[in-house]
Each structure stands twice: as structure tokens, then as C-alpha cells.
Amino acid sequence: MSARAALPEGVRVLVRGWLHGNTTLLDAGGASVVVDCGYHVGSGELRAWLGEADARLGHVLLTHCHSDHAGGVAALEEQQPRVWASVASRALVAEWDERGLWLGHSGQELPRFEVHESLTPGQILRLGPWCIEVLATPGHMSSALSFYLPELNLVITGDALWERGFGLLDPWVEGEGCFQGAATALAVLARLPSDTLVIPGHGPPFLGLHHAVGIAEQRLERLRHDRREVRRQILASGLGFLKMARPELGAAALAGAEARLLEQHPL
Ligand SMILES: [Zn+2]
């Protein structure tokens, strides 16, 4: 069974519904660390939240560079944090590879930003008092990372693991290897202690890591063998995202977005 758990001292999480990936703040009075930043339309709210915490921003770590996780980075640039992402994510951002960044998925918008530092799986980062182990958790995005803080017994999983599933798998963009990638990510996370607190990319933090991995493995097994269902989820998610991000759009615009998604994801 999953259960809610208190966050360790110095850790805060901003959970804002499905349009915005969660933001985690690791604050210990010095240069603080932010993991993921939400979608760009919520940048004002993000800045206000950081201001309320009176956090002096030193570093931004990205689990991956999709618009709902990296959208707020540009708005934090005035505080001059060092921005960290995986080597491959950094390259996608440097080249501004719109396909690789999934910006074709229903016209998602991502203000341009710069990544300053590369992260490699297995790396142990020491930022202020925080010890952060970098884990490779591909699948949803082949260059995605999770961040494990062994001293706090906490893992930040992005879209590799949620309480009931994980982020979309899109073999049309990420390649057929995304299914095996997701399996690898779940195996990596399953090796962590069962009482590890999980801060997922969407939804509230939870306990019950191994239970969640079991749910995700079952879902992955279904998706592996059902390409129509994979595409149905991409359509539903793309259109759902668009409706949340741009509620003013009418039926014709939504139908146009659906047609583009179908064209990009032929069966
Ligand atoms: Zn994502």
C-alpha cells in the first residue's frame, strides 16, 4: 500500500496538477538546488514559491527537458543558477531539436534556455549539503535521469515512475528501444530500499516504491504488445495537455492538433 510521508527537512515540493511537472526544492540556507521547473505559463507562480521559501538559487537539475519540466528554467535565469542535464538532453537543448524535445506534441511551448553542466549516470553530485546520485532512467525520454539522495532516503523520478505508472512512451520519437529503456529504468529504481520516499514528476510524493514499480511493470507489459494503445495514449495526452495549456482553443484548432499527432504517429 502506498502512503503519504512527511518530507525531510529542507525539502519542499511544488505539486501543481498535470500541466506542470513537480518542482523540488533542496534548501539548506546556502545555494539551493531546484529539480525541474514546470510548464512556462506557471513561471510567475514558481518564482513566488521560491521567493516565499527565501531560497537563494544555485543550481537547477533537470530530470529531462520536456516542456512541462524545463519550461520554467528561462524564467529563473536572472538568478544565474547553474543548469544541469544529461549529456544527451544538453545536446538536444543546444541544437534546439524540436522533435527530440517533443515540441511537436500538440504545439507545446518551451522558452529557450541554456544547459551549463552535463550529468552522467553513476555520478555523485555534492551540492552544498546535498549528496545526489545520478541514475539513468530512460524509456519515456531516452536521456532522462532520476536523482537519488541516499542520506535522505529519497528519489526524484521525473516521468520514469509515478505512483500509478510513468510518462508516455513514444517509440515514433524515442525509438523502439523505449520499451526496454522503461524496463531498465524500473529495474534501477527497484534496487533502491523499499522505504525510499518517491517524488514523482507528477502527483504527490509517496511511499511504496516497490508497489509502484510493480504497477508500472504491468502497464509496460501491456503497452509493449499494443501499439494502438500506445498511440491512443499519445493522442489523449497531447490533446489533454493542449486543452490545459490553451483553454481558449476551439474545436477546429483541437482537430488540427489531433490530425498532426496522427500524422506524426502512423500505425
Ligand atoms: Zn516528460
Image (tube, rainbow, N blue to C red):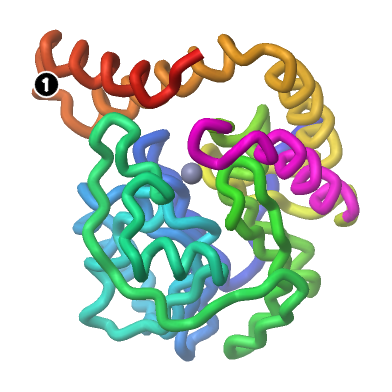
> From the viewer's perspective, is 173 left or right of 221?
left
Is 149 drawn above or below residue 191 in the view shown?
below
Rate crowding at label 1 as few (under 14), some (14 to 19) or many (20 or more) other CA atoms within 10 Å: few
Residues in magenta?
171-191
Q: Position of residue 263 (x, y in %)?
A: 34, 19
Residue under numbered circle 1: 249
Mark 1 within 8 Å of ligand 1, using the beta carbon: no
**Residue 42, can we see it?**
no
Answer whether residue 187 is magenta in the image: yes
> From the viewer's perspective, is 111 left or right of 7?
left
Label 1, secondary structure: give it: loop
Q: Main secondary structure of the magenta part?
A: helix
**Residue 116, can we see it?**
yes
Is 84 drawn above or below residue 167 in the view shown?
below
> From the viewer's perspective, is 151 left or right of 47?
right
The quadrant where residue 9 appears: bottom right
Q: Position of residue 87 (x, y in %)?
A: 55, 71
Q: Quadrant of the N terminus?
A: top right
Q: Nearer the viewer, residue 220 or 205?
A: 220
Q: Nearer the viewer, residue 219 or 132?
A: 219
Q: For the point 30% across and 85% down, which residue is it?
A: 80
Q: For the point 76% across and 39% down, which residue is it?
A: 180
Q: For the point 35% across and 48% down, which residue is it?
A: 67
Q: For the point 71% across and 34% down, which residue is it?
A: 179
Q: Position of residue 183 (x, y in %)?
A: 79, 39
Is 84 drawn above or below residue 159 in the view shown?
below
Q: How many marks?
A: 1
Could you tell me the amino acid type at mark 1? Leu
Q: Nearer the viewer, residue 267 or 2?
A: 267
Answer whether residue 71 is magenta in the image: no
